[in-house]
Image (cartoon, rainbow, N blue to C red):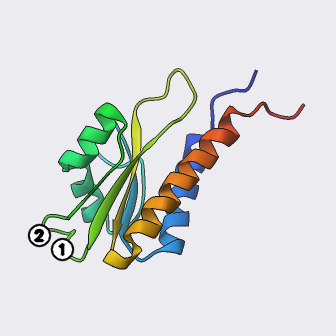
Amino acid sequence: MAGPPNNNELFTDLTEALAMACSVVCAAVIIKDEDSPSHFVGDPEAAKLLITLDSVQATLADGIPRTETPPFDTALAETAFIAVEALSIPHPQSQSSVIVFAGKHLIDCERAVALVHALTTEIANELMAPSPT
């Protein structure tokens, strides 16, 4: 039987992949009921603000992906869009978690959302596969 997934490595890989693929203000992993992001790349103030967004809290509650226009006059002011994708981590003790991507260019939105979805799906598949013995 496989042990729990290495969430630190998983979360680091996800945030770094997003930052390398698209122009980001911030990419962050947020875990339900946590006061700060588990992992993030980019602006730390933006990462803190992402936790407070209704779309983030709603996706933590129901697992439905969302995109939204960022709030103005905040650390997210440079952001053109925010995308939220639920992370499915196959382990009984895992809390609800999401990856949030705050992109600088609206033209990146569809590509970033597709990338986040593909990465989270691929990682979930890898974690569900039996480990070689």
Residue 31 locus on image (x, y percent): 37, 39
Taking the view exactly as shown, the residue that stands out farthest to the right is 133
Left or right, 45 with reference to 110: left
Q: In the rendered image of this protein, does residue 43 appear above or below residue 86?
A: below
Residue 12 visible in rendering = no
- Checking the image for residue 15, the label placed there is none
Residue type marked 2: Phe
Residue type marked 1: Ala
Q: Label 1: few (<14), some or many (≥20) within 10 Å?
A: some
The residue lying at 18 percent from left, 73 percent from top is 77
The residue lying at 78 percent from left, 30 percent from top is 130
Whole-Å distance between the Cαs marked 2 and 1?
A: 5 Å
Residue 85 locus on image (x, y percent): 40, 48
Q: Please identify the quadrant where the C terminus is shown.
A: top right
Residue 116 visible in rendering = yes
Q: Please identify the quadrant where the N terminus is shown.
A: top right
Residue at numbered disc 1: 77
Q: In the rendered image of this protein, does residue 132 appear above or below residue 115?
A: above
The residue lying at 30 percent from left, 59 percent from top is 47
Q: Is mark 1 on a helix, strand or loop?
A: loop
The residue lying at 58 percent from left, 57 percent from top is 13
Residue 63 locus on image (x, y percent): 37, 36
Residue 122 locus on image (x, y percent): 63, 48
Q: Are marks 2 and 1 in contact (CB under 8 Å)?
A: yes
Residue at numbered disc 2: 72
Q: Is mark 2 on a helix, strand or loop?
A: loop
Q: In the rendered image of this protein, does residue 99 appear above or below residue 5?
A: below
Left or right, 42 with reference to 94: left
Q: Earlier in the sequence, mark 2 or mark 1?
A: 2
Q: Total marks drawn? A: 2
